[in-house]
């Protein structure tokens, strides 16, 4: 087994050690498959394999992990009453927009 294959195998072991909450089984399989495919190329270098590995696991390192959401009491009922003094006026010239979406790498 040459040095490139040893490097790929060590990366595969590191991938297996990543928690399931960060990478599921299908994602791990895909990353290993990509590393194997890159390793079989003719002019592959150690640097290329390292760069591919870093790119593939980068999402894991910067990804968000969420805890279980807190639950609310389900045995109570709350009645709300509109407070006219605290309500927004529809004729207001200021209008803000809330955008909710995914975080993308820059």
Image (spheres, rainbow, N blue to C red):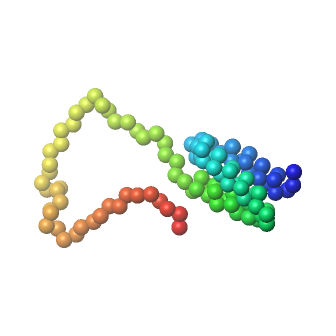
In this view, which residue lies farthest toward the bottom?
Answer: 93
Q: Which x, y percent locates residue 50?
A: 73, 60
Foreground residue among 45 and 103: 45
Foreground residue among 28 and 62: 28
Give the number of callouts: 0
Residue at x 14%, y 49% (from the top left corner): 82
* Image side of residue 37 versus residue 26, left or right: right
* Image side of residue 88 versus residue 36, left or right: left
Foreground residue among 69 and 37: 37
In this view, which residue lies farthest toward the top?
Answer: 75
Residue at x 73%, y 53% (from the top left corner): 36
Q: Which x, y percent locates residue 96?
A: 27, 66
Whether residue 27 is situated above or below residue 47 in the rendered picture: above
In this view, which residue lies farthest toward the right?
Answer: 1
Residue at x 69%, y 43% (from the top left corner): 16
Q: Dividing the picture into quarters, in which one does residue 45 lie? A: bottom right
Q: Which x, y percent locates residue 101?
A: 40, 58
* Image side of residue 85 versus residue 52, left or right: left
Residue at x 73%, y 48% (from the top left corner): 12
Q: Which x, y percent locates residue 3?
A: 85, 56
């Amino acid at each position: 087994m040459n040095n490139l294959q040893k490097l790929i195998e060590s990366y595969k072991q590191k991938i297996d050690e990543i928690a399931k909450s960060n990478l599921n089984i299908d994602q791990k399989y895909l990353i290993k498959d990509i590393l194997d495919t890159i390793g079989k190329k003719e002019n592959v270098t150690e640097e290329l394999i390292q760069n591919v590995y870093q790119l593939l696991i980068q999402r894991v390192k910067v990804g968000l992990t969420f805890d279980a959401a807190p639950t609310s009491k389900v045995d109570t009922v709350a009645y709300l009453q509109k407070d006219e003094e605290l309500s927004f006026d529809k004729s207001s010239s200021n209008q803000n927009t809330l955008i909710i979406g995914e975080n993308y790498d820059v």
